[in-house]
Amino acid sequence: MDDVRRSVAVLAARVRDAHTARVWLPLGYGSWEAYCGAEFGISRSQAYRLLDVARALAAIHGAVAAGTETSRTRDGRG
């Protein structure tokens, strides 16, 4: 199951990076949907779900990192 989670996280990050960079335009695809189908084999709605996953993972990572810094400050070690 850990392998599946890692694979989804990697795919979500790749979809996020592609969307952020708008890579479908210089690659000559007519739309985000066409790019996702050709490059990832997924639909537009699946791509947007993966974007949500990437955002959620980033938020969790940020919260964990912030929580770690806060706890170090509170206990006098940081």
Image (cartoon, rainbow, N blue to C red):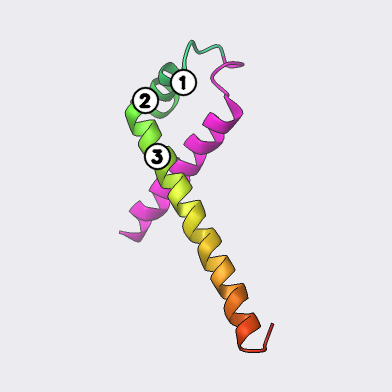
Considering only order in the chain, which callout, 3 or 2, is on the residue closer to the N terminus? 2
Q: Which amino acid does label 3 sit on?
A: Leu
Q: Name the residue under label 1.
A: 32
Q: Is residue 42 visible?
A: no
Q: Could you say where residue 2 lies in the image, as x and y percent from the top left? A: 35, 60
Residue 52 is left or right of residue 19, and the answer is left
Q: Residue placed at 39% from the left, 32% from the top?
A: 47
Q: Residue placed at 47% from the left, 15% from the top?
A: 31
Q: Could you say where residue 38 lies in the image, as x and y percent from the top left? A: 41, 20
Q: What residue type is labelled 2?
A: Arg
Considering only order in the chain, which callout, 1 or 2, is on the residue closer to the N terminus? 1
Q: Residue 1 carries which label?
A: none
Q: Residue furthest bottom?
A: 76
Q: Name the residue under label 3.
A: 50
Question: In this picture, which residue range is highlighted in magenta?
Answer: 1-27
**Can you say whether 32 is above or below 65 in the image?**
above
Q: Name the residue under label 2.
A: 44
Q: Distance between the residues labelled 3 and 1?
A: 14 Å
> Few, some or many C-alpha atoms within 10 Å of disc 3 (few <14, some 14-19, many ≥20)?
many
Instruction: Name which quarter of the figure residue 42 lies in.
Output: top left
Contact check, label 2 and label 1, Cβ < 8 Å = yes
